[in-house]
Amino acid sequence: MQPPEATPTMRNSPGLPILVAGGGIGGLTSALCLAQQGFEVRVFEQVAAFSEVGAGIQLSPNCTRVLHDLGLEAALLRHAFLPEGVEMRDWKSGRVLFRNPLGETARRTFGFPVYHVHRADLVEVLVEAARAEPRITLEAGARVTSVEQAADSVTVRAGGDRHVGALLVGADGIHSATRAAMFGADAPTFTGCVAWRGLVPADRLPTGLVRPMATAWWGPGKHFVHYYLRRGELVNCVCIVEKDGWEVESWTERGEPGELKRDFAGWHDDVQRLLEAMDPDSCFKWALFDRPPMPRWSDRRVTLLGDACHPTLPFLAQGAAMAIEDGAVLARCLARGTDVPASLARYESLRHDRTASIQAGSRRNKTLFHLDGARARLRNLVAGPLQRRVIRGLFGYDALAAAS
C-alpha cells in the first residue's frame, strides 16, 4: 500500500483509532483501506485466531479493483484460479444454455480480473497484509460485548478490556452483535432453500470433467455450481435445494453426503461424479434466510459493513464483494471528511442503493434459476443477454471513485 500524503484528522475525535468489530473479509479489508488513508485501526476478532470457515468465493472486478489497489495482486495470484468464463447448463441433458467469457475479456473490459479463491486463502492474504501494516493492530479472542457512545468517542469492551476509539465499524457478520446493540435483533425470513457446500480434489476427477470456468446447472427447484480453487487443485461445489424441515443458519453445520446425493438424484452424470468424489469431511449445509434492506445502518459514531447490514443471498456471488466495496468507500468518506457522524452518513448514503439492488437481484435469481417447464424454456432464451447486462452493472462499479 502506498502511504497517504498526510495523516487525516477528524475534527471532533483527534488522535483516536478506528475500532473494527470482526476480523473476516469485510473487517480486514476495511482496516487495510483505512490504514491506506492514514488512520490507526484496531480490529477485534471474537475467535482465538484470524481465520475463515467455508470454501470457495468468486471475486469479481468490482472488488479485485480494491484488492489490487491495496497491493494484493501478487499474493492473490499465489492462491487463486483465474476462470476463462461462466456457463449455465441444463440439469438433465448437460446442454450449455449460454456462456459468457471472463479471463482476459473481463480484464480488458473492466480493468481487473475475476479470481476464484478459497475463503481461508483470502483471509490469510488479508491477515498477512494487516500484520505488515504498522497502523493496524489485530486483537484475536476479543469479542466486542458492549458499546458506549460519547460526543467525541466510542468505547467498547472486547476481550475483557475497554478500548476507546473515534468510531466503531461493525463488520461482525450475519449475526452481528453490533447491529443487535444498535437496532435490536433482526427477524430474517427462511427462503425455503438449503445450501450445501463441499470440496472435490481435482485429481479424483476425469480430465476435462470440470471446465476452467464457473459452471451453474439449473434445474427445477434447485441448482448446482462448481468451479476450481487453489490454482486448479480443488473444485468448489455449492448446491442449493428448495426443501423444508431444516432451518439452521450456520456455516459450520456438518452435512450428510448421502442426503446431498439424494437431493440431486437423477441429475446429469457429471454432477453425480462430482458428488461421488467429494471429500465427505468438507460437506456442510446451511439454511438460507433473507433480510430486507435496512432503512439505516449508522448511528452517530457506529456504522455497519458487509453482512452485518446487507446480508446477501448467494445467487449473484456478490456478498464478499459488497463488503470489500464497503471498506473502500468508508475509508474514503472518512479521509475526505472531518466530522465522524457526517462522514458515516455519507458512506451509508453512497452504499445503500447499491447494496439494496444486489440484495434484490440475488433474491430474483433464486426464482430464475429454479424454473421448470415452459417458464424455464423462456428463461433460457433471454438469460444470456440478461446476464451480460447484469455483469456490466456489477463489474463496472468503481468503489475507489465513489466517494471522490
Image (cartoon, helix red, strand yellow):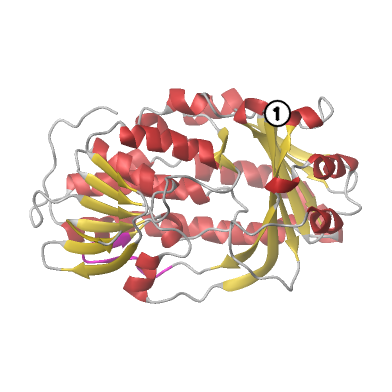
Please indicate, yes or no, whether residue 160 appears anywhere in the rendered image: yes
Q: Quadrant of the C terminus?
A: top left
Residue 332 at x, y = what percent?
Answer: 26, 44
> Local crowd at mark 1 within 10 Å, few (<14), some, or many (≥20)?
some
Is residue 298 in the magenta section? Answer: yes
Give the amino acid at mark 1.
Pro
Predominant SS of the magenta segment: loop
- Count of numbered circles in the view: 1
- Residue 93 relative to residue 126: left or right: right
Q: Provide the residue designation for mark 1.
A: 212
385 and 15: which one is in front?
Answer: 15
Residue 333 at x, y = what percent?
Answer: 24, 49
Residue 309 at x, y = what percent?
Answer: 41, 62
- Residue 333 relative to residue 23: left or right: left
Please indicate, yes or no, whether residue 66 appears anywhere in the rendered image: no
- Residue 276 relative to residue 30: left or right: right
245 and 191: which one is in front?
Answer: 245
- Residue 387 relative to residue 259: left or right: left
Q: Which residues are magenta?
A: 294-303
Depicted 51 relative to depicted 205: above or below: below
Residue 249 at x, y = what percent?
Answer: 59, 65
Is residue 70 in the magenta section? Answer: no
Taking the spot 37% from the left edge, 44% from the top edge, the residue there is: 28
Q: Secondary structure at mark 1?
A: loop
286 and 214: which one is in front?
Answer: 286
Taking the spot 29% from the left edge, 28% from the top edge, the residue there is: 1
Depicted 302 relative to depicted 48: above or below: below
